[in-house]
Image (cartoon, grey):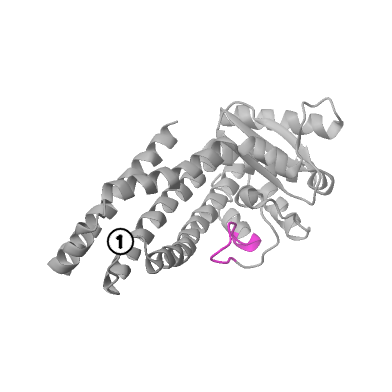
Amino acid sequence: MKRVFLFVAVNMAVMFTLSVVVSVVLSLAGPDVREALYSDGIDFFALGVFALVFGMGGAFISLLISKPMAKWSTGAQVVDGTESDDARWLVTTVDRLARAANVKTPEVAIYRGAPNAFATGAFKNSALVAVSDQILAQMSRPELEAVLGHEMSHVVNGDMVTLTLVQGVLNAVVLFLSRIIAYVVENALGERRRRGSTGVYVITVYLMQFVLGIAASLVVCAYSRRREYAADAGSARLLGTPQPMISALMRLGNLSAATLPKSLQAFGIGGRSSKTSLFATHPSIEDRVAALERLRGGV
């Protein structure tokens, strides 16, 4: 819960800062611009509340329903270890890693699909770790243990919460700035009708939401890549050596990794990419292996 409250506080601080910055800019723009903007009823507080509610609201909702949505979208079936030898090993291994990480054992699930695994859930003591049937069949157990250690590290670090709330903060910023920019453009073009009601305003809002949304996505992806390095390192610490995670990544690079539903892509184990893209949620296999190699002797 501390992580949730922290990011709500950060979001409020961001909105306050933006309001101050906009006010300073308008104060330097001259009395004519200020008169046009304020006389036509721009309410920065109301706009900030709107951005906060809709930007953060969507993030909270997606976070709270993340587990049932993950099960539904992948067809994952929760197992308790009685279903098969693989299921028993999987549940036992996740339980052992959870105890080592001092968190409650998450739900464990298996779904049909190409090699992949993911973790999700709103709280670290009520999470879900799922693996595909093909990754169970195509990786050795030491490699699978490393993959599970990676996913458990996401759970322990609260990455599902943090990444979702980072997106919520950026959503709020995009909603706020796009409407401020639209008002300024509308005024600059000499529109005389009621502010916020013209086609210029509407078009500018959608255009700026698109442009600023792309910039926000770059920030989210950059954070997600850092989170992947941390989860790889966390797996190495849980297992006492980076070698199993290195082997798992090398194996993954030779497999045809599954494409998860969009809402889960950032939480999967990764794919075969040979280079890191600005829009990638995961670093390249080569970069991740190189980072783990630097951990040798320091785990």
Work out whether residue 228 can be spotted: yes
**Region in magenta:** 276-287
In the rendering, at what x and y percent does residue 121 appear? 59, 36
Say left or right for 204 vs 33.
right
Name the residue beneath numbered marker 1. Answer: 195
In the rendering, at what x and y percent does residue 78 appear? 75, 31
Relative to 93, does residue 298 appear above or below in the rendering?
below
Most distant residue in the left direction: 31
Report the predominant secondary structure element of the magenta stretch.
loop
Image quarter (top left, top right, bottom left or bottom right) of the C terminus:
top right
In the rendering, at what x and y percent does residue 260 appear? 70, 51
Image quarter (top left, top right, bottom left or bottom right) of the N terminus:
top left
In depth, the one of 5 and 21 nearer the eye is 21
| Residue 275 occupies quadrant | bottom right
Residue located at (20% from left, 57% from top): 38
In the rendering, at what x and y percent does residue 238 appear? 61, 38
Q: Give the residue type that dot 1 points to.
A: Arg
Most distant residue in the bottom direction: 189
- Count neighbours of disc 1 (C-alpha within 10 A) and say few if under 14, some if 14 to 19, many if 20 or more: some
Residue located at (61% from left, 44% from top): 236
In depth, the one of 298 and 18 nearer the eye is 18
Element at label 1: loop
Most distant residue in the front direction: 193
**Does the magenta-highlighted stretch encompass residue 275?**
no
| Residue 136 occupies quadrant | top right
Relative to 167, does residue 217 appear above or below in the rendering?
below
| Residue 10 occupies quadrant | top left
In depth, the one of 246 and 91 nearer the eye is 91
**Does the magenta-highlighted stretch encompass residue 285?**
yes
